[in-house]
Amino acid sequence: MALQLAQRIDALKASDVREMLKITQRSEIISFAGGLPAPELLPIRELEEATHRVLQEEGAQALQYSTTEGYLPLREKLVARMAARGGVRTSVEEVLITTGAQQALDLTGKLFLDEGDTVICESPTYTGAISALKVFAPRWVEVPTDDEGMDLEALERRLQYCDRVKLIYVVPNFQNPTGTTWSLERRRRFAEIVTQHSVAVVEDDTYGELRFEGLPLPPIKSFDSKGHIVYIGTFSKVLSPGMRIGWLTASSPLYEKYVILKQGSDLHTSTLCQMQISAYLEMFDFDKSLSRMRAVYRERRDAMIRALEKEMPKGVRFSRPSGGLFLWVELPPHMDARELLRRSLELDVAFVPGGSFFPKGNKENTLRLSYSHMPVERIEEGVRRLSAAARGMMSAGTEDARLSGVESAY
Amino acid sequence: MALQLAQRIDALKASDVREMLKITQRSEIISFAGGLPAPELLPIRELEEATHRVLQEEGAQALQYSTTEGYLPLREKLVARMAARGGVRTSVEEVLITTGAQQALDLTGKLFLDEGDTVICESPTYTGAISALKVFAPRWVEVPTDDEGMDLEALERRLQYCDRVKLIYVVPNFQNPTGTTWSLERRRRFAEIVTQHSVAVVEDDTYGELRFEGLPLPPIKSFDSKGHIVYIGTFSKVLSPGMRIGWLTASSPLYEKYVILKQGSDLHTSTLCQMQISAYLEMFDFDKSLSRMRAVYRERRDAMIRALEKEMPKGVRFSRPSGGLFLWVELPPHMDARELLRRSLELDVAFVPGGSFFPKGNKENTLRLSYSHMPVERIEEGVRRLSAAARGMMSAGTEDARLSGVESAY
């Protein structure tokens, strides 16, 4: 007799993005798939020096159990950085170190969601948030977005008419997958609305440090008057994803509950990795490293946009993000990005089909391209091949797709 | 209006053990509380050399995202070690690296438990398993144990009469908190029973490598003919808890589900920490280090038992484990270990009251003592103070407690 599993397991499947990563480990692949930092930007030597100092000076502490809340000097630095960056006023008693931003999402699901509760999100949204929250069996309600962020009239209608809305998940800076950044006005008004409706918000600011142009906008958390907004950050995109160091900040009494849930989930995040990053921040100029990183990614974004403009057939639209790692492509409605992936993998080019960014799995004519991981020449070559694959599909399909021009409306 | 949380949150409270760790960070405290490895046994220099090699030779890989399943060379080494140690025949396709053994428990709850399902465990059981599984709102059914392990007749009665038994959690080697080790016959028979009843088992072997005397016994997993037993291991007690590297091994199709759940929970465990440990295992003699560790802990166990025999008042019973980190103390029935803790903390001695090791929180006259973290002289001094606190409580309480002799029946 087979073992009986929890009901939540029926709905689960492996993430396309993660499964894709396995393929993209082949070196000949031009990968626009995972949101991986450029390998040449990883601070290998600096982290080795930081490790040396940590193990020489505080080795026994670094290898030992530590408190669930996280390494205090690191939390102090995060409090200072969040305040400096955009007015998130918090304290170490409200900062919890997590095993990547992903764990902050898992803990959020545990904290808020009973089966059948409603989660509201941007459409599309981060596939990892979908997989983190899906195990708590929520009902998903998507809200359309435009180039200034979430459509707030649509949000208000949903808040009025949907039952049991427990949580809203948003990525206001350089959103994964679209690259969209919310305007200041949209942020402020959104904070007002969620405060009125007493609904919890998770603001995922994974990409906020990676702005290529324009002025930084304050996080939505900075407009949080009632302690309803949980702010998530991570070192994964700006220092090292492999170390799995993220954090959340939440007000009491949410914070204490998060800590208890974290305790049950993995006791605490790697002491060594926390201390390595804390030492790195003391020993090196992180902001200078961020500037370098932004310059590299800006150049790659530009290269990808130029190549898409030049190579992509008519009827293909794509976004022009002002930061982050991703841009979003819409194929003509009849085209299936999974079929495009099959064809482009034959040409050694990988990306993530857009379907997995919709909780209910529609809009199969979309895809996410990451420009962070490949040097400019490979981006150009990859877009050439991808475009050839798209043209091949189009000429095999209907003629309609050729009618509208190349657009990049959002 | 306050935010509405998930129903599961009502039942949660912070773990006594973890809260205790905060107190025990004061250096004057003689701590028998957390199951912390001795700081002087942590391989600081060796891990520094291992880190140097990893970052020099494979730095970009170490700091980058990696697959959810875990670092392949580490999984290969685990497969070999499990086979060598006691006949757990598995393969890399069945080994998942987790963020400590604790995360393996969290994932197990996610995989098996719907609200109201029954979890069977030893009585008492590991408090961290209780907190990991509690969020999935199971019903707990405890099975008494004797000095050979779980009472299997009692187990069979429960399997016959309890509804919705989904999971059995056991720690057959040097159990946390009692120190009990299951006999070979008990292991074999247990495997037969659970196979007949098609119930999933989690065998937590956190302490298996820390045997001080006698021959190692095969894990229950080695008798698993149907793939119903999930085996959990960790480097936390034998190398470094701060690095948070544990693992589980499960057969298909459970394995694939665990991987998906892990993906949603934290994507993967720190690549760097996995590679550091893998390099350590290649560069240094782990078995020799284990021998040293066993010798140190054996000496400390002996010191604690001698001191308890000498100092503890009549009516106090305690276990004599043949390995691991803990022994278990039963006070006379009327005595409350929380009151004893209050008194002993005044004398700068910490331990964990036993109540938190019972899912339903009874048996408040028990406590867990860890002998791993303190040198022999501090163990002797600590037991002297603890015994003085116990005598003080007894003379303040009823006279009955003095009637029975010092015992160590299990």
Image: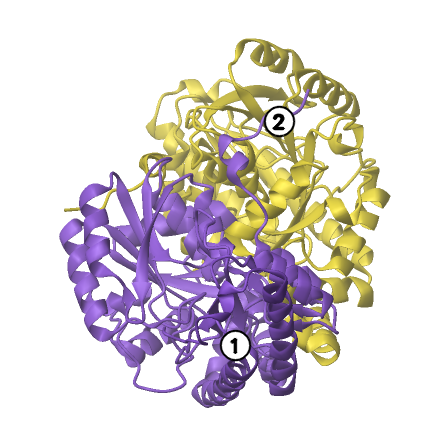
Chain colours: A purple, B yellow
Question: In which quadrant of the rendered image does the N terminus of chain A lie?
Answer: top right
Name the subunit of mark 2: B
Q: Verify CB contact (< 8 Å) between mark 1 and mark 2.
A: no
Q: Is residue B43 visible?
A: no
Towards the viewer: B370 or B131: B131
Residue B229 placement (x, y as % from top left): 69, 31
- Local secondary structure at mark 2: loop
Towards the viewer: B312 or A318: A318
Amino acid on which the number 2 mark rests in the picture: Ser
**Mark-to-mark CA distance, 1 and 2:** 54 Å
- Local secondary structure at mark 1: loop
- Comparing labels 1 and 2, the label whose residue is closer to the camera: 1
Residue A45 placement (x, y as % from top left): 63, 85
Residue B173 placement (x, y as % from top left): 69, 35
The residue carrying mark 2 is B408
Q: Residue at x 84, y 37 (%)?
A: B87
Up/down of A319 relative to B297, above or below: below
Name the subunit of mark 1: A
Q: Residue at x 43, y 37 (%)?
A: B135
